[in-house]
Structure formats: structure tokens, C-alpha cells
Amino acid sequence: MLQDIPTVRQTAVYVYQAPVRVWHWVNALSILVLAVTGYLIGAPPPTLSGEASDHYLMGNIRFLHFAAAYVFAVGFLFRIYWALVGNTYSRQLFSLPFWRRRFWRELVHELRWYAFLEREPCKYIGHNPLAHLFMVAIITVGGLVMIVTGFALYAEQTGLGSWQDELFGWVIPWVGQSQDVRMWHHWGMWVIVVFVMLHVYTAIREDIMSRQSLISTMISGWRMFKDDRP
Amino acid sequence: MASTETFYEVMRRQGISRRSFLKYCSLTAAALGLAPSYAGRIAEAMETKPRTPVLWLHGLECTCCTESFIRSAHPLAQDVVLSMISLDYDDTLMAAAGHQAEAILEEIRERYRGNYILAVEGNPPLAQDGMSCIIAGRPFLEQLQEVAADCKAVIAWGSCASWGCVQAARPNPTRATPVHEVIRDKPVIKVPGCPPIAEVMTGVITYMLTFDRLPPLDRQGRPLMFYGQRIHDKCYRRPHFDAGQFVESWDDEGARKGYCLYKMGCKGPTTYNACSTVRWNDGVSFPIQSGHGCIGCSERDFWDKDSFYDHVTDTHVFGIEANADRVGIAAAGSVGAAIGAHAVASALHRTKQRDRAQHEEREE
């Protein structure tokens, strides 16, 4: 019976520092709120009857959206700060080893792993190359696009001359007109929704099938490896 | 000489009483969002300043701007500004025609070099050497460039002159081009709308003539006092929007009760104009008040922004037309299905691998 218990030593590395973990979950929550309320702003719930003064449904939906947007934006700024003062892995969101051949080779390996063409995946302390690419493209670049377009639209109600307008008002004429910015902001929501689906699925799958811990790492900060092979 | 008269003299000549004149001044001050004390300044300016000539050119357009302008509610605005312009040049409204009319352009250009205002209704087509719009035997583009060369400032009337409007809508066969892309060395004030509101038009002209300077403009060159806020910001149906009370289909209970037209594709939230405050035809009504959503006629390329009746409109890019919600739901659905399939495949794969590993172990 004793042979069935694996005898491998579990090594662990401290990867995600506490602020990064807190940011991850706060960010996840704000994205959830932003996507749901954002969709409802585009396609409001069925009409309510009675006096207009009895309800404030759209007002509340929009308030939640703006409040979550501020959390998201402040979190984004904080995350940039933490990339400067945090450990190596905290900088991955803002740097892509685009010119390193090994990165692309490992990315192909990762793709083949998902296509069941590789027996086992490589081990990574930080993000695997595929995850790294998606994080930079969706969370960093995508997040920035959503912040810029979102604040440009928000500036429409805070009014000309407000700081939101001073900082982001140029976006609307640059893109075309208000309707265009709305539509791109809306497209951005769907891109993020699809990303979140993939992210959650791969995190669970890798936690089970890869040679390292995933979900518990974003809670405890420690990356655990299931074997000692390279 | 008519051309050196002041506004006040013109008004008096037209039989307007001083009392009416002062009323006009205070109304104009209010319309421009100025303090009451400015009424006196407007009166003084109109009494003392020699009036500035306005030349009104017509390119590719439908004359709806002129139609709107002559309906300016306040009779004095209409009489004063209109008589002033008809003295100079506007081929739709002036009495002169043919060579006589064209001679006026030359004369004003010579006599008021750098001191007249050029108002442009419509825009020049640039394709086929401008042959799609011929004025007095020459492409409109030439007339526009000549008259603009000596003007003080340009007013771009309506969405045609400001953005291009319907003749510039995809695929824009004549290459109709908004004025600011043709006249680059003069300040261009955009007064968009299809047409712009009459009082907005007379308000802008009055501001420029009395204060002798351009009105404060936004980033895109539109006068702030009329285009600083969206229709939605000042809409009388806004409380229904905030409450979540919408017209869901034409003729439903919400439509009868005057709920918000957001779901019917009202472009009020994306349109900068003064309709919800100034309204139309002497403040009688405006589209939303009449039960129809705003179509966003004062916004850039509003013809190309797809349906007037959808809130989430189609996006056109790289020649493809797509709706964010339809594509998004389809993408999320197919990605979800793919995830499910991949999860099942992963589980099977893992079981197979484990079986094989156990098999190998046993063989050893």
C-alpha cells in the first residue's frame, strides 16, 4: 500500500506577493461588476412601471459601473507601482520577452500541450508563455484601452473642463464620435468576457493536469511543484 | 452707404422700436448664456459698431440650413441678420442673380479684406476636379477657396460643412469634404446639425458680430454654449432613463407615457446639441418630445453609424459589418462549448495516460 503514496519531494517558490494577490481578486471582482453592469447599460432590464421617482434602477446600475471602474483604474495604477517595487514576477504583466526565441519555442510547446500533442507541460515559476502573452494583451493593453475609453465616456457627463475631460476627452474626436467610443468599449467587454472564461478554465485544468499549483498560488502566493524533474 | 450702417440703424430703418431692440439684446444675452449685464454690452455694440458683412456660400447641400435659419423664432434676429446677409451675398435669399450676384462677392472681398465672415452651407466635392458642384460655371471648391482667402473667420453651417453629412456617407462617390479639411488657414466654427437650430445659428452670428471675436469653442470647433452638453444631459425624459423606464416598442404603454427612448435607439446620449433646451420652431418641440428618438444629426458621420433604432449599433471596420452583442454572445457561446469539449478530452486523455502508466508499472 505504501508504494501508492508518491515519494516525490514537493518544492515551492514564493511567487505572488500579498499585494499582487489582493489586486488579483479585487480586479476580478471589479471586472465581474463592470461586465454585468456594462452589459445592462447597453441593454437595460425590462421597463419598470409606476412613478419615475419610485425607481432609480439605471442610476444605480451606472453608479455601480462607475464605482467599479474607479476601483479597476486605481488598482491598475497600483499594479504599475507594484511592478516597480515588487519581485521579478510582478513585472511579467508589463514586459513581454518578445525577442527571445525561447519564449516562442515554449509558447508553441504550451499550445501543443493543450492540443494533447505533448506528454507533459514545462514547469514555470511565473506565467507560462501562453498565459504571459494573454495577460499582457488582455489585462494590461486591454485594461488600458477600457480605462481610456471608459473615462472618455465618463467625461461626457462630468462635463467639459473636468479632469476626466482634460485627460481623456481627446479620445472621442480621435476615434470618431461618442457612438464609436461606446461601441469599442462594448467590444472590449466581450473580449474580456471570453478571456475570463479561458482564464478560469485553464487555471482549473492546469491546477489538476500540470506539474504545478495554480489556484492555490493566487491565494497563498506559493508555487508548488508536483515533481522534481526539470 | 448701407454697408457702413450699424445693426441698430438697420433695425430702426426696418421699423423696429428701441424697446423691441433692447428685448432682443437681453434675449440674445440669455441665449448665449451670458450675465444680464451683457444685454447692455450687446446693445451698445449693435448701436456703435459698423456691421460686419457675412457672405453665405452654398456647396453640396439641401438648403435645410437656410430653411432653418429663416425660421429663427425671434423676429428681430430674423429681420436683422437676414436683411444684413441679403444685402451682401446668399444666392438662395438675395434678390440679385447671375453676374450681378457674383460681382457682390468680388466687391465685398475687395472692400472688407480680412473683415468679413464667410458662412458656408454644404461642402465641396473634391473628386473629378470638383465637377459635382458647379457655381457660376466653376467648381464650388474654387469659389470657396477664393472667398475664404480674405475672410476673418469661417462658419461651417450644418453637418455638411462640419462633417460631410449624407453626401459624404459611405462610399462618398464625389469625395464631399468638410470645410475644415479644405480651409486650413482660417478659424472654422462648426455649427453642426441637419439642420442646425435656427436660434443657434443666429446666436452664433450675433455673438461674433457684437463681440467681434469667435465664441468659445470645444475641441472640435463647436460653440460651447450650444454644443457643450449632450441632448441626454438636458432631456426632459431623463428621469425615466435614470428610473429604468423605457419605451420597449412603438405604441406600447411606455411610449404613451413618454418614457425614455433609449431602447428605441435614441442617440441623445451621444449627441451634442441644444435641442433639449432651445428646441425647435420657437421652442415648440424637438424630436424626443414628439416621441421619436434623436438620430444624432449633429454628430460626425451619423449616416454611417448604422440603425437609428438600435442602441448597440453595428460596427463597420475593414469593410465588415458586425454587432458587438451578436458577435460577443456567439463568441462566448462557442468558446464555452470549446472549453467543455476540451475539458472532456482532457479528462479522457488523463485517464488513458494514467492507465498506461499503471500498465507499464505492472509490467516492470
Image (spheres, coloured by chain):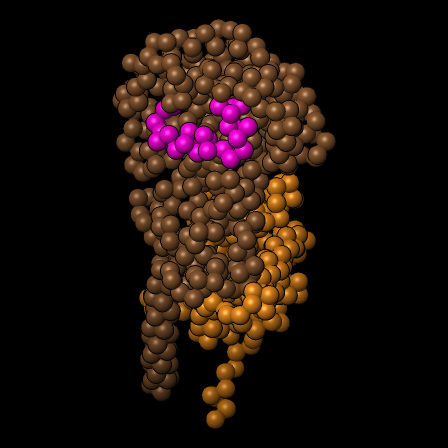
Q: Nearer the viewer, residue B355 or B289?
A: B289
Q: Position of residue B1 (x, y in %)?
A: 54, 7
Q: Is residue A64 above or below residue B230?
A: below
Q: Position of residue B196 (x, y in %)?
A: 46, 35
Residue B288 showing in the rendered view = yes
Where is residue A12, by image quadrant? bottom right
Q: Residue at x 58, y 61 (%)?
A: A59
Q: Nearer the viewer, residue B212 or A85?
A: B212
Chain letter for the part of the structure drawn in orange: A
Left or right, B143 with respect to B7, comes to left
Q: Residue at x 65, y 44 (%)?
A: A163
Magenta span includes B304: no
Q: Residue at x 31, y 47 (%)?
A: B320
Q: Nearer the viewer, residue A176 or A189?
A: A176
Chain letter for the part of the structure drawn in brown: B
Give the residues drawn in magenta, as a range.
B57-82
